[in-house]
Each structure stands twice: as C-alpha cells, then as structure tokens.
Image (cartoon, rainbow, N blue to C red):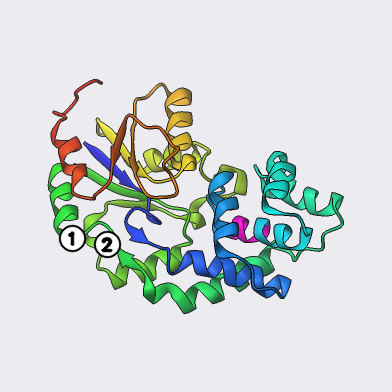
Amino acid sequence: MTVIFDVDGVLIDVSQSYHFAIKDTVDHFTGKDNSKEDILDIKFSFNINNDWDVSLAGIIYSKSGLQLDQFKQKFKPYSMSLEKMYQFAKENNIPVPQYQEIVDTFEEYYHQHRDKEKLLFDHDVLERVRKKADVLGVITGRPFEDLDYTFKQFDLYKYFDYIITEDDIPEPDQRKPSSYPLKLFFEKIEMDKPVFYIGDTNADKKMVENFNTEEGENIRFILFENKHNRDIKSQYSIKACDEICEILNSYDYGVGE
C-alpha cells in the first residue's frame, strides 16, 4: 500500500500562515488593506493551488477596481496559468510586479507567520498510517525551505519515504493539477498498490484524475474536507484525520487492482 499526503490544509493548518501571507503580499503591492476573504474566494473559486499565483491574482483584482463578482467573471478565462494572468493585467492596463518579486515578498511575510501553523494529522494517526503503508510520501506545492522548517518543527520527517516539493517541479505548468508530480514520485518510488492520495483542493483531485487517465492506473483520491472545498465531489472523503484509518483498513493489499 502507498499513501501520499498533500501538506497545506491536510497535514498542516495554514489558515494563520499562508493565508495571511497572501493578504500581506497583496497589501504590500497595492497599498491597500484588502479583504483576505475576497482574495481567498478568488483562490478557491478558480482552484489556484500555488499561493504565489494567488497573490498575483489578488494584486490584479485589487488594482482592477472591479467588484469581486465582476472581476471573477472577467478574470475566469485567464485564471488557469501565470502567462494568462499577466496577459489579463496587460490587456487591462494594470501594472503588476515581476513574479520573482512577488515570490520573494510572499516568502518574507510567510516567515513572519509560519510559527502559527498547527498540525492537523496528529502523530498517533500518522504512526498508524505508517504501520499500514509500505510507502508513505508527500507531494506538496511548498518550496523545500518552507517544508523543511515545518517538518522539523513538528518532527514529521520520520514518517515519510519520499517527498516532492515545488523545487522539484521544472515549470509552472507542471504543478498540480498536472499529473507531473505523481509521475515524478513514481519514477523514484516503485508503486505499491493500492495507492491513495489525500488532498483538499480540486487541483489535488485533478492531478490524480489526470495521472489515472494518462497512465491507466487507479490511484484513489481522498478529500480532506474543510469549509472551502464543500463543492468538490469525491468517492472517498474524511472530516477528521483518524477517519483515514477506516478507509485504509477497508482495503486488503491488491484489492481492486
């Protein structure tokens, strides 16, 4: 059995860290006190998985002068990639910073908030999953530096065999929902079936679906439910971390493969 975790919103509660870093970054580049809830609405409405990208979208929204619903309607066709976001800004004469400047500023703010993070999957549950799974992994959009700080803070490295971070992804269009992170994972680790991926966003789900379609596999997606993802439909879902053990225990090795 292989079990792979997302980090933000699954292993770790980032509502007091990354979410505030997004708002701080948007405020920094716009000179305004922006609504964090409006910016998060953009993030989750358009399933923008990377928070650097969300910060760019938030900057564009703040500078557009549009009401949130108007902006979302107009921005939707441009929300799928960085290239299109910058195209939207150019077409609408909205000045935006270079991407690396956004990344650097975001990371500075995140470092101010990262000690507010909390562990969602407690050690007891992780130890039980570790005993059940032959392979335990992580695929996250976090840069390695951010993940390393948090994993050391919560003593998480001991559970995992292999980790994919933002630093392992060559191009932005190879991030989730692309199947690339999963393909990279299984280039390094032999697939031990059944395979489960635990995520909390549509990008997580789409990554699994894309991989299954392209590779002819049957990785099972487990949705870790929260207030932001209630519209995502999944065959498997959990509301509390210990519910994962019930799903894993219901599978004998090789079931359904």
Is there any visible trace of residue 85 in the rendered image? yes
Q: Earlier in the sequence, mark 2 or mark 1?
A: 1
Residue 11 at what x, y percent from top left?
A: 32, 56
- Residue 248, by quadrant, is top left
Pointer 2 local density, CA inside 10 Å: few below 14, some 14–19, many at least 20: some
Q: Of 56 and 163, which appears nearest the observer? A: 56
Disc 2 versus disc 1: nearer the observer:
1
* Residue at (43, 52) in percent of width and height: 140
Q: Is residue 75 above or below residue 216?
A: below
Q: Which mark is residue 123?
A: 1
Residue 187 at what x, y percent from top left?
A: 40, 39
Q: Which residues are magenta?
A: 52-56
Residue 172 at what x, y percent from top left?
A: 61, 49
Q: Of 32 and 161, which appears nearest the observer? A: 32
Pointer 1 local density, CA inside 10 Å: few below 14, some 14–19, many at least 20: some
Q: Secondary structure at mark 2?
A: helix
Q: Is residue 103 above or below residue 136?
A: below
* Residue at (48, 25) in percent of width and height: 214
- Is residue 53 rendered magenta in the image? yes
Q: Main structural element of the magenta stretch: helix, strand or loop?
A: helix
Most extreme residue toward the bottom is 112
Q: Is residue 207 left or right of residue 163?
A: right
Residue where numbered disc 2 is placed: 157
